[in-house]
Amino acid sequence: MRPATAKAGPVFDAMTVALPPGVPVHLENNVNCAALAELHEGAARGRTTFGYLRIGVGIGLGIVVGGHVLRGANGAAGELARLPYPWDDAVQPRREALEEYVGARSLLRRAAAAWQDTDGPRPGSADRLFALARQGHQTAAELVGRHAADVGRLAAAVAAVLDPGLIVLGAARARTRSSCRVCGPSWGG
């Protein structure tokens, strides 16, 4: 099955040419792979239906139904990055702008805009921003709190559409449960 995303197409094509005829090629995206890992070894073990919502540089949703990844008619189920955003009558939505708004790069852009000289050195990574928020840094905590609310709204939208019973939140790299404490007491801290 040829992947739905244009960037994966050339990899798929190269693999099918390099392998002997008749060898099946299955190319899966990182979020679906992470969802499968959660199904077999992680927070969703023992569940057959759930969503894996990944927030990092990009955003995506791995959807597992009946113990299998739901890929959709064209292999693009869960491609949240493709959603137009913002959802505001006063602003023209842009395709794939939701990822731009919720992803880590935009979080760091908001930090750069909000950071004052009195805040100390500006964090150069989301990890550093989250660490400062955990330490009680006011500007960092406000930024992370807003980000957490945005992620929560996205998770609520996923829950409303899919009714998965469980949404596992993931990030670009593994974090400890203590990282969630900065988001509020109900985030597993």
Image (spheres, rainbow, N blue to C red):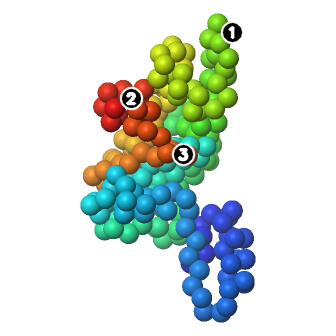
Q: CA distance from mark 2 to mark 1?
A: 27 Å
Residue 147 in picture, x, y percent from top left: 50, 30
Residue 45 in picture, x, y percent from top left: 31, 59
Can residue 63 be seen by looking at this rendering?
no
The crowding category of the residue bearing disc 1, from other C-alpha atoms within 10 Å (few below 14, some 14 to 19, many at least 20), is few
Residue on which the image places disc 3: 173
Return the mark for residue 148.
none
* Residue beneath the point at 68% across and 78% down: 15
Of 79 and 182, the residue lying toward us: 182
Can residue 159 be seen by looking at this rendering?
yes
Q: Earlier in the sequence, mark 2 or mark 1?
A: 1
* Residue beneath the point at 34% across and 32% down: 189
Q: Quadrant of the N terminus?
A: bottom right
Q: Residue furthest bottom?
A: 21
Of 120 and 21, the residue lying toward us: 120
Q: Three-letter amino acid code at disc 2?
A: Arg
Relative to residue 179, is residue 28 depicted above or below? below
- Say which of marks 3 and 1 sits in front: 3
Element carrying mark 3: loop
Q: CA distance from mark 3 to mark 1?
A: 29 Å
Q: Three-letter amino acid code at disc 1?
A: Asp
Residue 48's image quarter? bottom left
Return the mark for residue 117.
1
Residue on which the image places disc 2: 181
The crowding category of the residue bearing disc 3, from other C-alpha atoms within 10 Å (few below 14, some 14 to 19, many at least 20), is few
Residue 78 in picture, x, y percent from top left: 48, 57
- Relative side of 134 to 188, left or right: right
Of 140 and 2, the residue lying toward us: 140
- Relative side of 174 to 112, left or right: left
Relative to residue 28, is residue 100 depicted above or below? above
